[in-house]
Image (cartoon, rainbow, N blue to C red):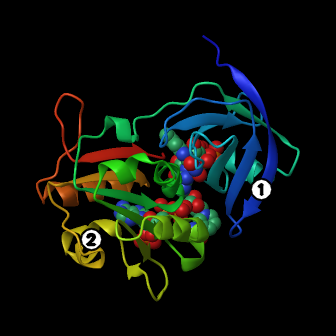
Amino acid sequence: MSEKWLEGRVIENRHWTEPLFSLRVEAPRLGFEAGQFVRIAIEERIARPFSFVNPPEDPVLEFYGIVVPQGPLSPKLALLGTGDRLLVASNPAGFLVLSELPDAETLWLVSTGTGIAPFLSILRTATPWRRFANVVLVHAVRHARELAYRDLIAEIGDAHRGSFQYITFVSREAAPGSLAGRIPAAMQDGRLEQAAGLKLDQRSHVMLCGNPQMLKDAAAALAARGLRKHRRRAPGHITVESFW
Ligand SMILES: Cc1cc2nc3c(=O)[nH]c(=O)nc-3n(C[C@H](O)[C@H](O)[C@H](O)COP(=O)(O)OP(=O)(O)OC[C@H]3O[C@@H](n4cnc5c(N)ncnc54)[C@H](O)[C@@H]3O)c2cc1C
Ligand SMILES: NC(=O)c1ccc[n+]([C@@H]2O[C@H](COP(=O)([O-])OP(=O)(O)OC[C@H]3O[C@@H](n4cnc5c(N)ncnc54)[C@H](OP(=O)(O)O)[C@@H]3O)[C@@H](O)[C@H]2O)c1
């Protein structure tokens, strides 16, 4: 069956750094759950999945991207301007959603790069605050200037003081206020738990999104702590979404 495309219009293309951009798009209303993605395109034959940054009830769609040099789509998306057309598929999908998760005490939302996108949508819904006593957003980037959406995250922190924490990693320069190195190593040596003041144990559920190698390395570090992949038929503690 051929994909059904909806026509959207770009209302803003914000550039955070040279390669990082956020597209805000007016498009026909789409039903989705926070954490899901949808395929977007400029021409139908070059379409890619992008996670929604906006919560489902927001009428403006938002996508957070990075220019992959030589990539067929992302450099073109970065060049879109106000009024330009963006095609949005009519069928959002994905399992990185809270409705798939078992109950837990602490929800860890762990991302690299643009992998933070689905978590920003989730954090702007009521569900995480209703279901989990603690919510920890972890974001790892190469350089401190790539820690996008800090104002939005500060607003979330203000609204959920006492139950929300934001922990950042900057891997390729010294950055005050951020942890150094990579997420899996900090899971292994206890630095992540120390920064959060929370245990990364079987009372946790960890959602991982972004670089596929980070997903593998983090899942291995978590397995060493007795956490296992979550499946509908065999509930566990780890849910992943790989961006490539
Ligand atoms: C379920 C899902 C959700 C996704 N959501 C997003 C999103 O919200 N934002 C987003 O920027 N991308 C997202 N992606 C990746 C996106 O679909 C594209 O792959 C990306 O925009 C690059 O497109 P491209 O055509 O330029 O290059 P592609 O041919 O698609 O990719 C080329 C290479 O670029 C690298 N790469 C791809 N995506 C990224 C990335 N996000 N960060 C760093 N390196 C990357 C990989 O090495 C990949 O092999 C998602 C992918 C999946 C599967
Ligand atoms: N970020 C930039 O400055 C920049 C600029 C221009 C273009 N790009 C393009 O964007 C793409 C990369 O995007 P990105 O920087 O958002 O993604 P990325 O390479 O996945 O890096 C994001 C974060 O993930 C970490 N990471 C990588 N592999 C990991 C692993 N196995 N385990 C744990 N952590 C891991 C990185 O640490 P390490 O630093 O230790 O790898 C970094 O902190 C490339 O195609 C690149 O060419 C990036």
Q: Is residue 124 above or below residue 32?
A: below
Label 1: element kind: strand
Reading the image, the residue beneath label 1 is: 13
- Marks 1, 2: nearer the viewer: 1
Residue 136 percent coordinates (x, y): 35, 64
Look at 52% across and 49% down and name the residue there: 121
Is 202 placed left or right of 98 in the picture?
A: left
Residue 72 at what x, y percent from top left? 68, 43
- Name the residue beneath numbered marker 2: 185
Tell me what residue is drawn at x 24 percent, y 30 percent.
232
Left or right position of 174 against 108: right
Tag 1: amino acid: Asn
Residues at discs 1 and 2 in contact (Cβ within 8 Å) = no
Please tell me whether residue 202 is drawn above or below residue 3 in the rendered image.
below
Residue at x 73% of width, y 30% of height: 28
- The three-letter amino acid code for the residue at tag 2 is Ala
Q: Residue furthest top?
A: 1
The yes-or-no answer for disc 2 within 8 Å of ligand 2 is yes
Mark 2 surroundings: few (<14), some (14-19) or many (≥20) residues within 10 A: some
Is there any visible trace of residue 47 in the rendered image?
A: no
